[in-house]
Image: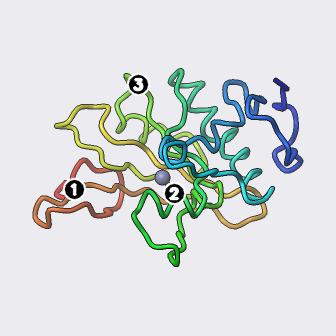
Amino acid sequence: MADLTGIPWNEFPEQASPVDKVSKNFKFYELTRSDTAARRGIANDFPSVQELRAAVYLCREVIQPVRDKFGRFSPNSVFRGHELERALKGRPDSWTSTSQHTRGEACDIEVAGVSTMELARWVQANLAFDQTILECYNAAAGPNSGWVHVSVKPPGTGENRGKVLSYVKDPAAGRYVYVDGLQESALA
Ligand SMILES: [Zn+2]
């Protein structure tokens, strides 16, 4: 295991080993790990150093600060290649995802014992980000329901908008919809 925490994000090597340290508490493999990919035999490797370095930046600027504040967790998902995106979303080979996960710019996180709403509020108040989305949170289902999607664009690749949304169930429509701000339901 190599400690790569001192290497600037934009000089991070293309050939890191899975157990190399990217930041104080996170290893390289955690940036591409996916249960679905493992189950379906999808490689989900970074296609180029660009996505890899974006994920390293995200790890250091978002994932590690959340760890410092709330304690131990591993991200549910960080980089997702197009093949994994198609598998997750049931799309045909012709479909191309526009998700920031495919660029290494987004992570989905939750921390055991921490309310997902509290986590989203903390990210909103304390971190620089492009988008923070409270996803599938439902207070009635428990404070740990859902997860927080956070994206950040590394320096020199575009403006970080600081946009905050929730992806919540609309009882009237019977489906999930995006609403502005951090909300427990589409009716709030
Ligand atoms: Zn996400």
x then y, percent, for residue 183: 28, 50
Mark 3 or 2, closer to the camera: 3
Q: Give amino acid for label 3.
A: Ala
Q: How crowded is the residue under tag 3: few (<14 C-alpha within 10 Å), some, or many (20+)?
A: few
Are the two marked residues, 1 and 3, in contact with CB atoms closer than 8 angstroms?
Answer: no
Mark 3 or 2, nearer chain start = 3
Where disc 1 sits, the SS reads strand
Q: Is residue 184 left or right of residue 162?
A: left
Residue occupying the point 89% across, 48% down:
11
Query: Closer to the N terminus: mark 1 or mark 3?
Result: 3
On the rendered structure, is 75 left or right of 12? Answer: left
Quadrant housing the C terminus: bottom left
Give how far apart the Cα atoms at labels 1 and 2 are.
19 Å
Q: Is residue 58 above or below residue 64?
A: below
Q: Which of the two residues, 135 or 16, is positioned nearer the viewer here?
A: 16
State if disc 2 and disc 1 touch (CB < 8 Å): no
Q: Which residue is mark 3?
A: 112
Mark 2: few, some, or many residues within 10 Å (few <14, many ≥20)? Answer: many
Q: Is residue 1 left or right of residue 74?
A: right
Res. 51 image quadrant: bottom right
Q: Which residue is mark 1?
A: 169
Q: Residue at x 20, y 62 (%)?
A: 175
Q: Using the numbered discs, state the Cα–Cα distance from disc 3 to disc 2 in whole angstroms.
A: 22 Å
Residue at 53% over, 69% down: 97
Which part of the image, by quadrant, shows the N terminus? top right
In the picture of the structure, the residue carrying the numbered disc 2 is: 131
